[in-house]
Image (cartoon, grey):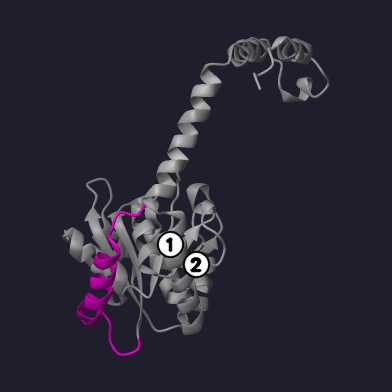
Amino acid sequence: HPLVERDDEIDAARERRVRLRHRVARGDEVVVGIAGDLNASKGIEALLAALPRVRSNVRGVLVGRTSSHWDVQGAVRRSGVGDRVTVVTDVRDDEFLEWLCAFDILINLRHPHRGETSGSLVRALHAGVPTIVSAVGTYLEVPEGVVARIASGPPDPVELAAAIDRLAEDREARGSMSRHARDYARSALAPRVTAAGYAEAVHRVLELNADPVRTSIARWARGLRAVGVGPQHAARGLGVRFAEALFELRPESPG
């Protein structure tokens, strides 16, 4: 997922974040937020359950679009921590970016994860917002030190609370993560880098589709699976000789 904002837009949003912080935070409160589509897969209930366990003085903020399939306001009411949480919906794109920049910590979890890349995470990295993510799928592509991770699967409120405390209590650690995030976003997520990755993926797919050996092996593998032959049988050599013979017949590449 390439960067979607210009550097000057990020810088302008960072300058305007103070106004939004004053709307929700008091004194030295650390603003911990979730941004984007406010649905059941984002770990919102885990954050609500984690807040009573957090030692630090934090304020929860949920910013984004509500879902007709999940009641975020109801989840906040049922949590018993509504006095520590602000929900902001139907924001403009520019204001959404300002809210991201107003967060001291972004919570960007996903369960279930369906292989998607988070646009909110890309924006947050570009803006240098310290972020806690799930250790799953595309989140694993981001290096250690650029984000903090908690275990994959349904988020554990105890683990999440501990991760929040580690960042909330250590301003220097948040600053270091912020710098690493911005550097990573501007290098690894630059549009030219992303475009090169797509081009390489397309090239590999075209090469595979043009390979007659691959097609024959795939058909052979489907036949083996249909009669109950699995990896444990292939490990003992069953069905392997045909594939080996196909590779022996493959013509050598020129040059």
What segment carries the magenta color?
1-28
Give the residue drawn at x 35%, y 51%.
Answer: 40
Magenta-highlighted stretch: main secondary structure? helix
Question: Do the numbered discs 2 and 1 sit on residues whose CB atoms are within 8 Å?
Answer: yes
Query: N-terminal of the two: label 2 or label 1?
Result: 1
Position of residue 174 measured from the top left corner of the image (x, y, whole percent): 46, 77
Left/right of residue 206 with respect to residue 83 in the rendered view: right
Task: Find residue 88 and report its horizontal and vertical position in percent.
Answer: 21, 66
Q: Nearer the viewer, residue 57 or 246?
A: 246
Verify whether residue 133 appears in magenta. Answer: no
| Residue for badge 1 | 46
At label 2, the amino acid type is Leu
Extreme front residue here?
255
Could you tell me which residue is drawn at 51 percent across and 47 percent down? 137
The image quarter in which residue 28 lies:
bottom left
Query: SS for tag 2?
Result: helix
Residue ID for mark 2: 160
Mark in the foreground, 2 or 1: 2
Number of residues whose C-alpha sits closer than 10 Å to that of mark 2, classed few (under 14), some (14–19) or many (20 or more): many
Q: Position of residue 61 (x, y in %)?
A: 30, 70
Give the SS element for disc 1. helix
* Residue toward you, 28 or 127: 127
Residue 3: % across, % down: 35, 54
Would you say residue 192 is visible in this rendering?
yes
Residue 1 appears in the figure? no
Residue in the picture at 28% in, 74% down: 14
Q: Is residue 205 above or below residue 221?
A: below
Residue positioned 43% across, 62% down in the render? 46
Q: CA distance from mark 2 to mark 1?
A: 8 Å
How many badges with numbers are in the image?
2
The answer to if 3 sits in the magenta stretch is yes
Q: Quadrant of residue 72?
A: bottom left
